Image (spheres, rainbow, N blue to C red):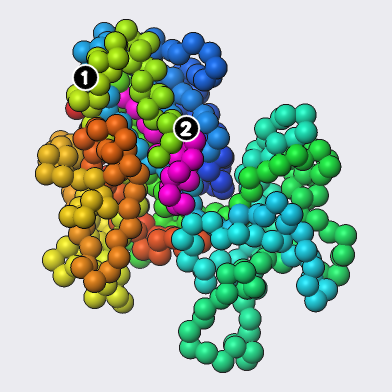
């Protein structure tokens, strides 16, 4: 297989193993540990010995590689991303009945493109906590479905589902005692009555696919933002094999970006500051030297970017129209919805040039609202120079999104060049 084919299939495998943020964090940590990274537990003394270290906190995963000779004179090179994606999160009491059907009560998580969740098989995945204190991951496989209303009963050109009444998936029919938690418990190998609490979300159960006339596209769920998590993971693993620089390399994959990042797992929480500060302290840095290290640091905030849509080109700025297949996108916004500035744009695009990777720039249409990322949050909290980048994507926040296979590989190669310096 070619490098591109191998990368694309590995990416699809990673998505399949990551139906929830908890699974994504666990899968990234598994691959890092397989490569020799050592698991760090937060309640134990911090490790900054030469080599790789990895920490999982809920649905977030942090990894750092400490080179020989690192110390208070070093800086940090950070690649930030997020593990969560929009979906339908199960409510604490999820079972209910309507018109003979057994259904599952859900809450819309993040800015889901609602109509795309209809008429596809959904898995239920995430974290269970048992009454004995065990934390377990579960993935049911195809279990739920959100059926559309037939057009004969819905005479309208515009489909606008009501979030409470119309977004509740079906589990089964004619079985009044059926419970989604019983099925989840069976898949987890525990009894339903042993589940004390859970964090469960739906995901498209279909596997990702490479497609197109030239097999140039990838279709899959959760690529916003597993596209960046996987690219940063691959970049760190490759650079760690023969890195000879002095800076500490950091992969920071946060949870809860899709709902504002305000959690102990999110970019607005303390997790990255904890990792950087404790690593600096373990390297012998004083309080002032920690801030000196931050001043020598930089961050690439990697999150999916908008490709120009051929059917809605007017939604894009007429002079900034990044497109799938033309390379990673540098995201710029004068109102600071993105953290990129002139110096960090130059830093990122120089890394792309070293890697032989084409780069595009995105600026929003003045008449269209602009999203945001972890970039401004990280820059604001830590004062670290930050740039926002990502692969161009169509169908963002759909249950099944679309990217370019070559762009995905190019993003990993650009991140690798950035980490190498």
Instruction: Judge whether residue 231 is colored magenta.
Output: no
Left or right: 50 in relation to 87: left
Left or right: 245 in relation to 282: left
Residue located at (18% from left, 49% from top): 359
Q: Which residue is mark 1?
A: 292
Residue located at (33% from left, 10% from top): 283
Quarter of the rendering occupied by the N terminus: top left
Dot 1 or dot 2, earlier in sequence: 2
Q: Is residue 312 visible?
A: yes
Residue located at (48% from left, 88% from top): 157
* Number of residues whose C-alpha sits closer than 10 Å to that of mark 2, classed few (under 14), some (14–19) or many (20 or more): many
* Magenta residue span: 249-267
As drawn, the label of residue 61 is: 2
Closer to the eye: label 1 or 2: 1
Residue 348 in which image quadrant: top left
Task: Name above or below for residue 395 compared with residue 404.
Answer: below
In three-dimensional space, the C-alpha distance between marks 1 and 2, rounded to whole angstroms, equals 25 Å
As drawn, the label of residue 335 is: none
Residue 10 percent across, percent down from the top left: 45, 42
- Choose between 49 and 354: the one closer to the eye: 49
Instruction: Judge whether residue 263 is colored magenta.
Output: yes
- Choose between 327 and 373: the one closer to the eye: 373
Residue 408 percent across, percent down from the top left: 33, 48
Q: Tags 1 and 2 in contact by the CB under 8 Å rule?
A: no
Task: Name above or below for residue 190 compared with residue 118.
Answer: above
Residue located at (64% from left, 48% from top): 200
Left or right: 154 in relation to 61: right
Residue 130 in which image quadrant: top right
Identify the secondary structure beneath mark 1.
helix
Identify the secondary structure beneath mark 2.
strand
- Choose between 339 and 238: the one closer to the eye: 339
Residue 381 percent across, percent down from the top left: 32, 35
């Amino acid at each position: 297989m070619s490098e591109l084919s191998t990368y694309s299939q590995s990416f699809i495998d990673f998505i399949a193993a990551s139906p929830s943020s908890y699974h994504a964090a666990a899968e990234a940590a598994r691959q890092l540990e397989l490569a020799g990274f050592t698991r760090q537990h937060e309640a134990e003394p911090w490790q900054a010995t030469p080599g790789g270290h990895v920490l999982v906190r809920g649905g977030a995963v942090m990894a750092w590689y400490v080179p020989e000779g690192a110390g208070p004179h070093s800086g940090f090179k950070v690649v930030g991303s997020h593990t969560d994606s929009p979906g339908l999160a199960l409510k604490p009491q999820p079972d209910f009945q309507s018109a003979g059907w057994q259904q599952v009560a859900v809450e819309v998580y993040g800015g889901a493109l609602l109509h795309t969740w209809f008429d596809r098989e959904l898995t239920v995945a995430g974290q269970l906590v048992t009454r004995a204190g065990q934390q377990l991951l579960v993935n049911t496989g195809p279990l739920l479905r959100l059926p559309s209303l037939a057009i004969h009963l819905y005479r309208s050109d515009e489909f606008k589902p009501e979030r409470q009444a119309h977004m509740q998936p079906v589990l089964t029919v004619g079985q009044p005692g059926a419970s989604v938690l019983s099925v989840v418990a069976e898949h987890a190998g525990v009894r339903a009555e042993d589940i004390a609490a859970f964090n469960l979300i739906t995901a498209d159960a279909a596997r990702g696919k490479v497609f197109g006339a030239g097999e140039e596209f990838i279709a899959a769920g959760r690529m916003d933002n597993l596209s960046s998590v996987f690219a940063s993971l691959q970049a760190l693993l490759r650079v760690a094999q023969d890195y000879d620089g002095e800076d500490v390399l950091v992969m920071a994959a946060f949870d809860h970006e899709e709902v504002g990042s305000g959690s102990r797992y999110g970019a607005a929480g303390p997790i990255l500051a904890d990792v950087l500060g404790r690593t600096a302290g373990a390297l012998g840095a004083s309080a002032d030297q920690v801030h000196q290290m931050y001043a020598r640091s930089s961050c690439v905030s990697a999150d999916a970017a908008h490709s120009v849509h051929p059917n809605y080109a007017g939604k894009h700025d007429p002079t900034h129209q990044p497109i799938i297949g033309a390379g990673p996108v540098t995201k710029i916004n004068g109102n600071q919805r993105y953290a990129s500035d002139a110096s960090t744009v130059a830093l990122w695009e120089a890394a792309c040039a070293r890697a032989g990777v084409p780069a595009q720039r995105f600026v929003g249409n003045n008449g269209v609202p602009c999203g945001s990322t972890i970039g401004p949050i990280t820059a604001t909290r830590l004062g670290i120079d930050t740039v926002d980048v990502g692969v161009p994507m169509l169908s963002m926040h759909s249950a099944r999104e679309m990217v370019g296979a070559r762009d995905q590989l190019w993003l990993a190669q650009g991140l690798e060049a950035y980490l190498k310096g």
